[in-house]
Image (cartoon, helix red, strand yellow):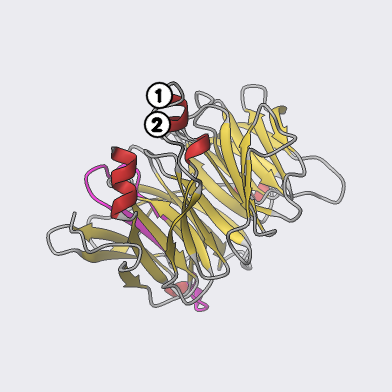
Amino acid sequence: MPNNITSNNPLIYGVEFQARSLCSLHAYKDQDCFLIGTQSLITSYNQVHLVKLQEETNTLCPQIYEHSCGEIWSLASSPTDKSLITTCYASIERDCEKCTALWRLPEDDGHLENVITFPSEKYGTDVKVTTFHPTNDAYMCSVIDNNIVMWDVGESGVKIVCTAVLDGKGQPRFTTGKWNPQSANLQFVTADDCNIKAWDLRTQTKIAWSLDGVHTQIIRDFDFNPNRQYYMATCGDDGYSKFWDIRNPKQPLISRADHSHWIWSLRYNPVHDELIGTASSDGQVLITCLAGISSSAVENEDIKTKSPIEDKIVATCDQHEDSVYCVEWSSADSWILASLSYDGRLLLNKVPKDEQLRILL
């Protein structure tokens, strides 16, 4: 990888339309690839951009696919199949109600191939996310209003495996959801208002554990430490990122207010879990090192000569000119962090070299 990608000298790719959805292509293990979904006011003009980093020339090369069914609010990629993605979008045909579909990426630019349009209308009009099961592409989960729907998209068409409903006063709704990678893929975790809930999908309605009232304003995102059991992070409109041991839900391990406005996205580094990327409406992307609660802290706790590492911000990426809605680490190079702002600007930044060396040595 060329050395000239840094937190102060990022690679930039611009989308013609506004955008607020970004994901890494998890099935690409040998190339840095990201997907962007657009939100054009002319809904039939919306697109999915597949952006690949070419190492030889240190440039970003796109493939563009038409997504003429509506503006994209979230998207996800398959962890095992390079060609499969999902989008959640405001449907032109259904008065801008949020719908969701499974697509196949063609080899060349053109229209996405529709595999399945999920029958989500039975469960609500606001589909937040549709995510792939971490190990089985036949299973997927959607968050729709106050419902979780698990789908089986096998050869016989789409079937409903199970559902769960969020009950409560005032018609509560989910804001997002994802699989818990720490639970042998048996739990689906959701955010609603200021709360986090883990649902045991084997029993459909049983809540395995919860973090209640953990932020003073709505939770926008959460993520799980990929290398340390029971550890996770949350962020939201109160401007805080908080880090938890779910066995002790009353008090966060760490609470940080590094951003000056809402935090929209938070991601653990998939390999070096002491590194966390965050994105905010303040226009900044931060890479923070929290070594004290990382898996490396556990590994080194018996090494007396090892000096404790101070928790700190190791990189500030301030080249965005609008609210930053998404951050995603690359699946191919764990030092690269991508971020997307509402004006359609994608930035690829790299963890500072001295921080890389400190972690590796």
Residue 36 versus residue 277 in the image, above or below: below
Mark 1 and 2 residues: CB-CB less than 8 Å, in contact?
yes
Badge 1 amino acid: Ile
Residue 299, horizontal then vertical, whole percent: 42, 25
Quarter of the view holding residue 262: bottom right
Q: Is 140 located above or below residue 41 in the figure?
A: above
- Residue 306: give its label: 2
Mark carried by residue 269: none
Q: Residue at x 33, y 43 (%)?
A: 358
Question: Could you say which disc has been placed on residue 303 in the image?
Answer: 1
| Vertical order, 238 against 177 (above or below) | below
The picture quadrant where one finds residue 314 is bottom left
Magenta region, residue range: 23-43
Q: Which element carries disc 1, helix, strand or loop?
A: loop
| Left-right relation of 102 to 186 | left
* Quadrant the N terminus occupies: bottom left
Quick one: SS at disc 2? Answer: loop
Q: Residue at x 41, y 44 (%)?
A: 269
In the picture provided, is 302 more to the left or to the right than 224? left
Disc 1 packing (10 Å; few <14; some 14–19; many ≥20): few
Instruction: Assign the C terminus to one quadrant of the image.
Output: top left
Q: Residue 88 in the image: state x and y as whole percent.
A: 53, 56
Distance (Cα) linking label 1 and label 2: 6 Å
Q: Per the image, is 40 magenta?
A: yes
Which residue is depicted at the point 54% across and 33% down?
Answer: 180
The structure residue drawn at horizontal position 42% and vertical position 53%, both measured from the top left corner, is 328
| Residue type highlighted by circle 2 | Lys
